[in-house]
Amino acid sequence: MTRTQVSAIAFAFSALFAGQAMAANTNATLTRDQVRAELADAVRTGNIVTGESSARLNEQFPALYPEQQTHSTVTRTQVQAELADAIRSGNIVVGESSAKLNEQFPNQYAQQDVDSKTRAEVRTELAEAAAHGWFDRHIEA
């Protein structure tokens, strides 16, 4: 081996060990009982990865473990209102394509223009244009 190869190998090992040492240094220290309690809870719920697959036990064998309880913070009426708004604006995906309805059929849905002007602003611009005689000029919108 050449000196360059030995240096590269030594650098790789030192980076590996330094990375593991930094990863092992955490500020949150758990007691032995807390770790045992977390392990018992993980075994009970099936949140443990075993073997070569990256799937947890409760994903591989869902009938053997209790279903994970998820509590929603949104009410039924809020969900229905959001769905109605999404359908009205075409912000919903239908079918196998990942395009939304307002992207597939833009003419069927109102475009939301963020930079729209109020009626009063348009009237003010019109009055200013009339006062300065700008009607014969091309004004960019």
Image: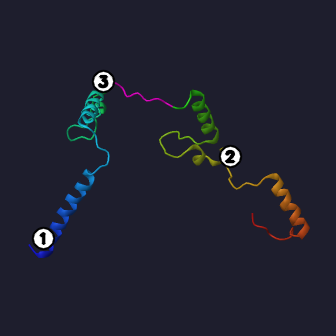
* Residue beneath the point at 80% across and 69% down: 138
77 over 113 or under it: above or below: above
* Residue at numbered disc 3: 63
* Outermost left residue: 1
Asked if the residue at tag 1 contacts the one at tag 2, i.e. Cβ–Cβ closer than 8 Å, the answer is no
The picture quadrant where one finds residue 137 is bottom right
What residue type is disc 3 on?
Ala
- The local secondary structure at tag 2 comes to loop
* Residue beneath the point at 25% across and 30% down: 40
What residue type is disc 2 on?
Ala
* Residue at numbered disc 1: 6
Q: Residues within 10 Å of mark 1 (few under 14, many from 20)?
A: few
- Does the magenta portion include 58? no
Label 3 or label 2, whichever comes before in sequence order:
3
* Residue beneath the point at 28% across and 40% down: 30
From the viewer's side, name the closer residue of 93 and 30.
30
> How many circles with numbers are drawn on the protein?
3
From the viewer's side, name the closer residue of 117 and 102.
117
Q: Nearer the viewer's eye, disc 2 or disc 1?
A: 1
* Residue beneath the point at 57% across and 27% down: 76
The picture quadrant where one finds residue 29 is top left
* Residue at numbered disc 2: 110
- The local secondary structure at tag 3 comes to helix
Magenta: main secondary structure equals loop
Residue 49 on image: x %, y %: 25, 37
Distance from disc 1 to disc 3, alpha carbons, whole Å, reads 53 Å
Asked if the residue at tag 2 contacts the one at tag 3, i.e. Cβ–Cβ closer than 8 Å, the answer is no
41 over 53 or under it: above or below: above
